[in-house]
Image: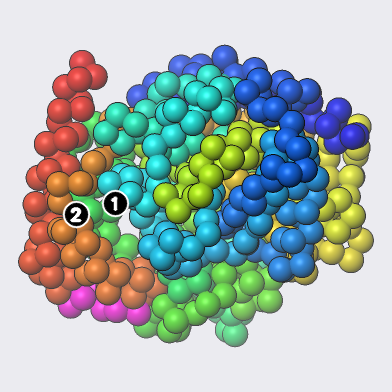
Amino acid sequence: MKIKKLLATGLATAMAVTTLAGCGSTADNNASQSAGTDNVAGSTQAAASNDDVTTITIYAFNNSTTEAAEKVAAAVSEITEPAIGVKVNLLTGVNSEQLNLALASGEDLDLFFAMPWQVSMSTMATTNQIIALDDLLAEYAPDVLSGISEDDWRCSTVSGSIYGVPMNKDKAQGRGFEMVKSIADELGIDYSTPWTYEDLDANLRKVKEAYPDMYPLVPNTGTMIYPAWACDVLSDDLGVLENALSDSTQVVNFYDTDSFKEYCKWVYQWAQEGLMMPDAVNTTEGYQEFFNSGVGFGTFTSFKAGFEAEETRKCGKDIVVVQMENGAPHSTTSMVNASWCIANNSKNPEKAMQMLNLMYTNPEVSNLLVNGIEGDNWVFADESKGVITYPEGVDSSNTSYSSVGWAWPNEQITYVWEGDDPDVWEQLGEFNKNAQPSPAKGFVWDNSEVLNEVTACNNVVEKYRAGLLTGCLDPETAIPQMNQELDAAGINTIIEAKQAQLDAWLAEQN
């Protein structure tokens, strides 16, 4: 196929580009990655007969219509059935509640993107929701096993076993504020240098004065990305390093930090003054819908190389991002170990691993899953350079299959979208390499000894977090009450255990 020939070079380039800062190191970690596209199934994967086909169910984070997901699955299956005897069942738009229900109920599920902001890999591993991958990787995905650095594998290792395949994406992030560029430029808003909360406050007021019917600050599906500063959440937010840009390795209660209290104070004030969308905790729409419809101006965000072009496609309007004062690009274990896992429910984990191997190494499979169907969801803008765009009459607001490359195993072997720099994957590699590593990068928290406390504390967090992040709860009363309940639930026991593990890990590094 034309795509296979065109992307073969891209695969080699992308594998070389993944000289990303692995956990505990900023060295060239992935130079050994050299998987070829003419044998993408791997030396251990023989062609399957028509009588030996297994259906593999994949839970995906991106949104699509049912028809589009079925069409993508069928196109992928045309490749995977003859190669490895796998037919794909693709479910898109999966949220954390659906994923957790599937894992708990035992329904058909093989492969999924572990949403690290919702549940830690160590929790899923210790509660037997996912399986160890070491033997499966060695037998069915040797290219993936050898192509990812030891430092990166360490980030998805729990109690000595690998539980997830780290995605080849941004492995570092900055923290900032994204906004509609046309309005920012019209109002003379300077986004060339980092903002303080006071800077943001002044600019939100400027927007509200010029556009009284617009909300200068909007949420994302009932919550807000957090933290808005450089914090290392240490696998979950029950005990964190408040500032990953410092040398401090003291584990503290996230919800009792000055950083969290300051953030909540500002958001609550903005909500009281009409600068933040009211009742934001109960909204179901994403920020991109608010931007596209003219309802919203900006929201807090993480960012990476190529982020503005990616968001512009998603939102249907030109987007710019400004770094927050304490949000310089940094890298933590949680940013690296965002991984694809095999569910314990999987009836055929061997086939699931073969499928995951193709998702990571095969450009045709990866491009279909990331970008959808040629002609329906994308067309070539410059075929010779592998640059794509939306078909006529299609944009981010009406495409039947949204592109969320970072949430798939390997976006860096897919086509580049028009508006991105042609060398965006190289830029992403440099961004990852140059970000400041947290002093705890590479540490993986094992919560198996405090699972009862973790469950109890998560119940408390779920009760308060979204309301505080969206300005719907008064932090003067809600934060003390939340911390009182966290104390009773065992947060200090968790912090003590996490500190002891971190100290032991740090001692091993010296």
Secondary structure beneath dot 2 equals: helix
Magenta region: which residues? Answer: 472-480
Residue 107 shown left or right of residue 168 in the figure: left
Badge count? 2
Q: Is residue 506 visible?
A: yes
Is-magenta flag for residue 478? yes
Which amino acid, by three-letter code, is at mark 2?
Answer: Leu
Question: In the picture provided, is 504 more to the left or to the right than 201?
Answer: left
The label shown at residue 451 is 2
Of residues 26 and 190, the one nearer the viewer is 26
- Residue 356 in view here: no
Residue 382 falls left or right of residue 283? right
Q: Residue furthest front?
A: 51
Closest to the observer: 403 or 147?
A: 147
Asked if residue 419 is positioned above or below residue 57 in the image, the reply reads above
Residue placed under numbered mark 1 in the picture: 127
Report how far apart the C-alphas of labels 1 and 2 lie in the structure. Answer: 9 Å
**Crowding at mark 1 (Cα within 10 Å: few <14, some 14-19, many 20+):** few
Q: Image point 62% across, 61% down: which residue?
A: 91
Mark 1 and mark 2 in contact? Answer it, CB < 8 Å. yes
Q: Is residue 346 above or below residue 181?
A: above
Q: Give x and y (percent) for residue 403.
A: 69, 53
Q: Is residue 346 magenta?
A: no
> Which one is in front in this view, the residue at disc 1 or the one at disc 2?
1
Instruction: Check disc 2: other Cα within 10 Å, few if <14, some if 14-19, many if 20+.
Output: some
